[in-house]
Image (spheres, rainbow, N blue to C red):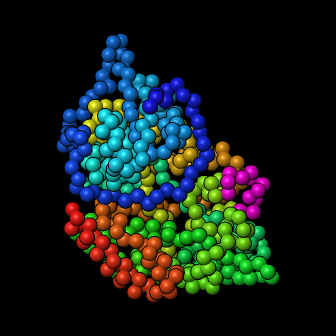
């Protein structure tokens, strides 16, 4: 582990679909005595940013546990490190799991900031809610995207801000103009999204064979349609499965069933949108023109563009709820104020603009200037309809995340519809029963 201060800043243009994050708590004991300074010590921060000497601030090293490579760490935090003259940032690699954190503590490594999936942090009771520090340092939490802020609050049992979001995600409807031209269809509107019903109608019309070529109207997945409701699968207190009580799940699976009922859509050997050039439309996250196509030159993907993703007719501006890795200050840290300065500096508009230009990360902030710079230094996005990413408002989470949601496998419900031709009502009933059994078993093991 070495300081970032004297290392060159390496920016890489690479991003993938992020995992869907949920918070869980298994009530385990605190680790190695590190977490005995818990949420009750908010009024006893170790204020180490006092002036010394002739007004110079004491030099502090902030260790950051980060679950990706050192190159990614430099790309995310290098500029922040350079900007904070009184703070050095130290990269601490870890595997993003509870076991990885415990291994660090066993080696007497105690990071001040932990970045990654929240369940391991919550399981070990390491988090320090940031509301009081935000007030103390004058940081307006409403600068964050409301959906991301609601997600950060949903991770905490008391609705406090568990951490700062490290980023977020956009989604777009990517389409191939050549396929639209070949089938005599108008391109999707660049500003106004289709409804999901309109999308399915168009997908049916474009899933046809012309000569020797089989075209597919819509490839990939449509899970974003469910995320536009931000539904809770289970009750966080009782573990009750809510699949049959919340109509969002039936509506989504009905949509999925209609999509799968388009002839040819259940074929496991469907062509690739990026490679085969016979798929008309594809829904994917931001930066797909880079990571999905291998970071091509603009002329290699001239026939591709993007439009806003479809919406539900009764939710015409709702886009998928956002989530992100939280950047959490550890409750045992002796440098909470400095750690919070790191987080605040990370959110500096200048730094966020730098990452937006390279598409290193989608900003978690509401800031039009940052979005105006999005992808400006990524050649594959030259001339593309980037504004499509910014349509609408992301759904917000209600209440706290349920630990029991992890036992509800929506992917299995999709599989039964796709591979076993089961009807939606039966699929929901069986999934609810299976999930209830898993949750009761998990409760019994505690």
In the rendered image, the vertical position of residue 327 relative to residue 21, given as above or below: above
Where on the picture, by quarter, is residue 260?
Answer: bottom right
Q: Quadrant of the C terminus?
A: bottom left
Q: Position of residue 113 (x, y in %)?
A: 37, 39
In the rendered image, the vertical position of residue 298 relative to residue 60, given as above or below: below
72 relative to 216 in the view: left or right: left
Tell how many labels: 0
The answer, for residue 433, to whether it is visible in the render is yes
Q: Residue furthest right?
A: 211
Residue shown at 35%/20% (left/top)? 58
In the rendered image, the vertical position of residue 70 relative to residue 96, given as above or below: above
In the rendered image, the vertical position of residue 138 relative to residue 444, given as above or below: above
Residue shown at 20%/34% (left/top)? 44
Magenta segment: 293-304
Q: Position of residue 192 (x, y in %)?
A: 60, 68
Residue shown at 31%/31% (left/top)? 335
The answer, for residue 381, to whether it is visible in the render is no
Is 58 a magenta residue? no
The one nearer the camera, 212 or 338, is 212
The one nearer the camera, 424 or 120, is 120
The one nearer the camera, 213 or 85, is 213
The one nearer the camera, 421 or 20, is 421
180 relative to 21 in the view: left or right: right
Q: Quadrant of the N terminus?
A: top left
Q: Position of residue 109 (x, y in %)?
A: 34, 35
Where on the picture, by quarter, is residue 119?
Answer: bottom left
441 relative to 73 in the view: left or right: left
Q: Position of residue 166 (x, y in %)?
A: 45, 46
Where on the picture, by quarter, is residue 25?
Answer: bottom left
Residue shown at 50%/74% (left/top)? 312
């Amino acid at each position: 582990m070495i300081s970032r201060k004297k290392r060159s800043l390496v920016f890489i243009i690479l991003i993938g679909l992020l995992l869907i994050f949920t918070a869980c708590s298994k009530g385990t004991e605190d680790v190695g005595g590190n977490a005995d300074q818990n949420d009750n010590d908010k009024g006893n921060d170790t204020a180490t940013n006092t002036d010394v000497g002739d007004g110079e601030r004491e030099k502090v090293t902030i260790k950051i546990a980060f679950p990706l490579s050192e190159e990614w760490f430099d790309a995310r935090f290098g500029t922040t490190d350079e900007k904070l003259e009184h703070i050095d940032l130290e990269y601490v690699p870890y595997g993003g799991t509870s076991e990885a954190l415990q291994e660090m503590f066993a080696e007497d490594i105690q990071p001040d900031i932990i970045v990654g999936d929240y369940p391991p942090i919550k399981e070990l009771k390491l988090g320090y809610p940031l509301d009081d520090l935000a007030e103390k340092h004058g940081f307006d939490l409403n600068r964050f995207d409301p959906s991301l802020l609601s997600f950060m609050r949903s991770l905490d049992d008391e609705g406090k801000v568990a951490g700062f979001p490290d980023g977020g995600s956009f989604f777009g409807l990517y389409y191939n103009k050549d396929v639209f031209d070949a089938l005599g269809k108008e391109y999707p509107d660049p500003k106004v999204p289709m409804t999901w019903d309109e999308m399915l109608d168009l997908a049916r019309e474009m899933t046809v064979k012309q000569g020797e070529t089989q075209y597919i109207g819509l490839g990939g997945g449509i899970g974003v349609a469910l995320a536009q409701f931000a539904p809770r699968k289970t009750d966080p207190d009782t573990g009750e499965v809510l699949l049959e009580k919340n109509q969002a799940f039936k509506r989504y699976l009905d949509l999925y069933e209609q999509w799968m009922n388009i002839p040819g859509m259940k074929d496991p050997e469907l062509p690739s949108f990026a490679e085969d050039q016979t798929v008309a439309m594809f829904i994917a996250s931001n930066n797909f023109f880079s990571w999905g196509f291998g970071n091509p030159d603009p002329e290699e993907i001239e026939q591709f563009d993007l439009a806003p993703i479809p919406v539900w007719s009764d939710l015409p501006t709702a886009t998928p709820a956002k989530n992100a890795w939280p950047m959490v200050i550890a409750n045992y840290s002796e440098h909470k104020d400095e750690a919070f300065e790191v987080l605040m500096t990370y959110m500096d508009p200048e730094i966020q603009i730098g990452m937006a230009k390279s598409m290193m990360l989608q900003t978690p902030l509401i800031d039009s200037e940052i979005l105006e710079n999005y992808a400006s230094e990524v050649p594959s996005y030259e001339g593309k309809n980037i504004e499509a990413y910014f349509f609408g408002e992301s759904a917000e989470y209600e209440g706290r995340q349920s630990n029991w949601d992890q036992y509800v496998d929506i992917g299995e419900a999709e599989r039964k519809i796709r591979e076993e031709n089961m009807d939606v009502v039966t699929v929901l009933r069986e999934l609810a029963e299976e999930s209830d059994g898993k949750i009761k078993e998990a409760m019994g093991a505690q």
